[in-house]
Image (cartoon, helix red, strand yellow):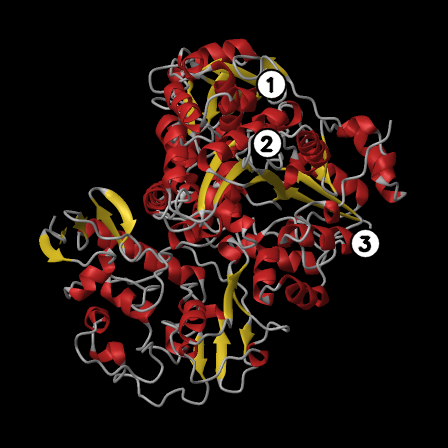
């Protein structure tokens, strides 16, 4: 068995999308050479500054050469292991972030790669490595040093499991292809909209907007074109349910897009796939081709005159912010993923200013099931305000990490019993942007009205250092801030400075208070959801686990940020000294 | 339905389509702002015009006014937020007022005075940013850039060019120039462009006019930022300022 090479993006239908062209250049040259910018700008009819701006915005594009093997270790608290990264750096004699002099290898870290149920994980030239262990590092080192192509690496290293542990309404049965479309075409779009409304379906990305209302607003919007976009930019650390849905239920997800298109009169749709899931492209393209062949996509779908709908896949390039719907639309429009000013909302002014529905992968899958089984079938599950089931990505310190589908309203306690996580001292519900929940609150329910979640459940056992966890999240947000608004662009790096200072044992009670003041400002005054949630982990930690922070504080009024010993690091480096005499204390 | 809203309890009229900022400026009410300039598409990024609208935080320059809206503007809590935001802008860049020829004409500096800011308060970032002196008439000093995108918008919307853009992400966001070399000298920016004069800080400055107006007689030496920005004082801004 061989590892199939990554598909060339040049063969994709949307090959001329700027992101795809940059992926190709990055792949070919291992960076994007300056001399390629002007020709590319001319070819695509874009300003050269737009190309430059985009390259520098997305993590997977570089202006200087990366190694022939570019290895990116996840730094997520569930699928990351930076100790492994350090070990590999030593074995390969390379500094993190610095390409080895012979150009063969570069190693760096990256945000969560969505393999939290099968870490430690890394990407090598865009391919996902799972279940990495110390034991395999010597072999990996040899493969890199001998320049062995990836398709000759042990194929098992790249295997990704679904790990479905508990199925419910949606991932229980694979519907026959076209079941949703056939059911709807026997009635009409009004009837489907009525069923979706009856189902009480709310957006599964976490925000929980009423799906029927969104579709209805888009349908009613007076715009020449209507679009449906599937948000598969699943970047919230700890979330990997969309990975599984797109692996095993992609056909029903695409069908959900077609159903939405039928309601809102869209002729074109996009699946915006996070760059980390690039390995899914071949199977997704195959599914689309199959759907074309069976007239579930294309012109006059299922012989319905005038029902034309097509889907293109656009691949992201490492930017968490693009999971925010208006940033995603900017990215689709070949720009930096900066959140738009709202109002107007995408339903009236979305992709290219046209009326657009942006829905989560899971929402669209649910729509297909509702089309087949009816709205009441879905409504009968869950709670009054949170109908149906939720597909949860459970990871961290539990015996059975993986996918769990439960009706909304299930208590965290029940979930922890099922996944073998009863040892937990805390659970991060909804990922870093969600809520840190302490043991005393495990009776709380997973539902929009209590603990809302896009599906990320990260379990932290008794041995975990929660300050390290929250510090990890704080670094994550500072790294992923788009930089548009002052509170988030400046505030998230400042929060990082404060928590680093406290974690290093240099913080005072004053620093903690300033961190809280700043955190509240960032939360309340930022432009979009990223900034508005970036301080949540910190604020939750200080409220629910105050001792975790206070036990590291200095008992003095003030300690400057400036640290003379740390400032001498460059000098030590230049003089190749790191002995005791080269340190101040 | 009458077209009025309330700012700090004062009822003021608005025309449909106006933002809170438009209505406030028309009524002579000052809402602090840095990235906003009447005539250019509102941006909403600096957040200095942050107000509370019926209890929710919003940027006054982008939120459309609606009838009966209750806007909190000049409250101690909001002034504190805005002061903190100005401090954040100061520590993010390299702002050395005494050596900057924009001093006295700089809106960021004027806002600092307006809010009674005495220091940067937060640990400075000391970013490494490039200076571009390649243009014969105009210098681009990114150390002072606050990423307000006034130059980006002025070039596109008023000059009919596209000289500037923002590149990068997060704290590494930076002003870039739309030319093959990325240098200002290779762009089509000219001294009579609005974009060459709109910078509210000292990031884009005309060359050879450094100290024509002595310190002490510059815009904000003579007027507060409130007077200058409500703009009903018939103010003649000095050479480098954003008029």
Dot 2 and dot 3 within a common chain: yes
Badge 2 crowding class, 10 Å Cα cut-off, few under 14, some 14 to 19, many 20 or more, is many
User: In the rendering, which numbered label is found on residue A401?
Assistant: 1
User: In the displayed structure, would residue A330 be above or below residue A2?
Assistant: below
Residue A236: percent from left, percent from top: 52, 34
User: In the rendering, which numbered label is found on residue A301?
Assistant: 2
Measure how far apart labels 3 and 1 are at the Cα level.
37 Å
Give the chain letter at badge 3: A
- SS assignment at label 3: loop
Horizontal placement of A560 versus B48: left or right?
right
User: In the rendering, which numbered label is found on residue B59?
Assistant: none
| Quarter the N terminus of chain A occupies | top right
Horizontal placement of B23 versus A114: left or right?
left
- Kindly identify which residue carries mark 3: A103
Badge 1 crowding class, 10 Å Cα cut-off, few under 14, some 14 to 19, many 20 or more, is many
Nearer-N-terminus badge (1/2): 2
Asked which quadrant contains residue B106, the reply is bottom left
Residue B70: percent from left, percent from top: 16, 47
Nearer-N-terminus badge (3/1): 3
Give the chain letter at badge 2: A
């Amino acid at each position: 068995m061989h590892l199939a090479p990554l598909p060339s993006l040049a063969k994709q239908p949307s090959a001329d999308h700027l992101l795809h062209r940059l992926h190709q250049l990055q792949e070919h040259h291992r960076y994007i050479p300056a001399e390629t910018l002007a020709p590319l700008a001319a070819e695509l009819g874009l300003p050269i500054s737009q190309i430059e701006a985009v390259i520098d915005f997305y993590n997977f594009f570089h202006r200087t050469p990366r190694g022939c093997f570019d290895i990116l270790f996840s730094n997520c608290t569930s699928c990351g292991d930076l100790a492994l990264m350090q070990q590999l750096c030593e074995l390969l004699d390379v500094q993190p972030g610095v390409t080895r002099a012979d150009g063969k290898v570069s190693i760096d870290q990256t945000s969560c790669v969505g393999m939290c149920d099968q870490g430690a994980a890394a990407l090598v030239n865009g391919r996902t490595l799972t279940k990495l262990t110390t034991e395999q590092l010597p072999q990996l080192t040899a493969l890199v040093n001998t320049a062995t192509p990836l398709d000759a690496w042990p194929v098992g290293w790249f295997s990704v499991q679904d790990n479905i542990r508990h199925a419910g309404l949606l991932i229980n049965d694979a519907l026959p292809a076209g079941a949703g479309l056939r059911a709807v075409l026997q009635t009409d779009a009004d009837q489907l909209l009525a069923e979706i409304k009856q189902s009480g379906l709310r957006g599964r990305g976490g925000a929980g907007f009423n799906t029927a209302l969104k579709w209805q607003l888009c349908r009613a919007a007076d715009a020449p074109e209507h679009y449906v976009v599937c948000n598969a930019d699943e970047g919230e650390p700890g979330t990997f349910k969309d990975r599984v849905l797109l692996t095993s239920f992609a056909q029903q997800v695409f069908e959900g897009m077609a159903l939405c298109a039928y309601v809102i009169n869209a002729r074109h749709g996009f699946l915006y796939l996070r760059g980390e899931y690039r390995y899914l492209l071949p199977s997704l393209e195959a599914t689309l081709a199959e759907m074309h062949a069976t007239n579930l996509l294309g012109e006059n779908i299922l012989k319905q005159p005038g029902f034309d709908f097509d889907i293109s896949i656009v691949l992201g390039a490492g930017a968490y912010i693009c999971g925010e719907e208006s940033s995603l639309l900017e990215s689709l429009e070949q720009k930096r993923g900066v959140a738009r000013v709202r109002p107007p909302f995408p339903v009236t002014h979305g992709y290219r200013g046209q009326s657009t529905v942006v829905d989560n992968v899971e929402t669209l899958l649910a729509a297909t099931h509702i089309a087949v089984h009816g709205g009441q079938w879905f409504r009968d599950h869950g709670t009054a305000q949170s109908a149906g089931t939720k597909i949860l990505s459970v990871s961290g310190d539990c015996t059975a990490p993986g996918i769990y589908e439960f009706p909304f309203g299930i208590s965290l306690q029940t979930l922890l019993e099922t996944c073998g996580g009863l040892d937990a001292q805390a659970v991060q519900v909804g990922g870093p942007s969600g809520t840190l929940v302490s043991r005393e609150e495990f009776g709380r329910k997973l539902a929009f009205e209590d603990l809302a979640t896009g599906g990320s459940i990260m379990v932290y056992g008794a041995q975990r250092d929660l300050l390290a966890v929250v510090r990890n999240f704080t670094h994550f947000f500072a790294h992923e801030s788009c930089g548009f608004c002052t509170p988030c662009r400046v505030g998230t790096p400042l929060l990082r400075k404060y928590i680093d200072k406290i974690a290093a044992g240099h913080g005072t009670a004053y620093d903690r208070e300033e961190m809280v003041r700043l955190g509240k400002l960032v939360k309340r005054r930022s432009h979009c959801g990223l900034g508005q949630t970036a301080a949540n982990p910190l604020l939750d930690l200080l409220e629910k686990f105050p001792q975790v922070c206070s036990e590291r504080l200095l008992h003095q009024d003030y300690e400057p940020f400036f640290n003379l010993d740390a400032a001498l690091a460059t000098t030590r480096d230049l003089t190749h000294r790191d002995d005791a005499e080269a340190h101040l204390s | 339905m009458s077209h009025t809203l309330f700012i700090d309890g004062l009822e003021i009229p608005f025309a449909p389509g106006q933002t809170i900022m438009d209505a406030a400026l028309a009524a002579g009410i000052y809402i602090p702002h840095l990235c906003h300039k009447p005539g250019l598409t509102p941006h909403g990024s600096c957040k200095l015009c942050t107000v509370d609208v019926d209890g929710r935080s919003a940027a006054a320059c982008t939120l459309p006014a609606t009838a009966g809206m209750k806007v909190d503007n000049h409250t101690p809590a909001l002034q504190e937020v805005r002061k903190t935001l100005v401090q954040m802008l100061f520590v993010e860049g390299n702002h050395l007022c005494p050596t900057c020829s924009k001093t006295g004409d700089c809106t960021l500096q004027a806002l600092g005075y307006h809010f009674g800011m005495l220091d940067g308060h937060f640990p400075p970032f000391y970013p490494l940013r490039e200076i571009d002196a390649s243009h014969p008439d105009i210098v681009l000093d990114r150390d002072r850039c606050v990423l307000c995108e006034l130059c980006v918008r002025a070039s596109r919307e008023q000059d009919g060019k596209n000289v500037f853009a923002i590149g990068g992400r997060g704290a590494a966001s930076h002003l870039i120039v739309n030319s093959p070399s990325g240098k200002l000298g290779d762009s089509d920016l000219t001294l009579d462009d609005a974009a060459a004069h709109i910078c509210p800080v000292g990031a884009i400055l005309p060359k050879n006019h450094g100290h024509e107006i002595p310190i002490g007689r510059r815009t904000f030496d003579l007027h507060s930022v409130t007077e200058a920005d409500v703009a009903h004082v018939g103010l003649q801004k000095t050479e480098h300022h954003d008029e």
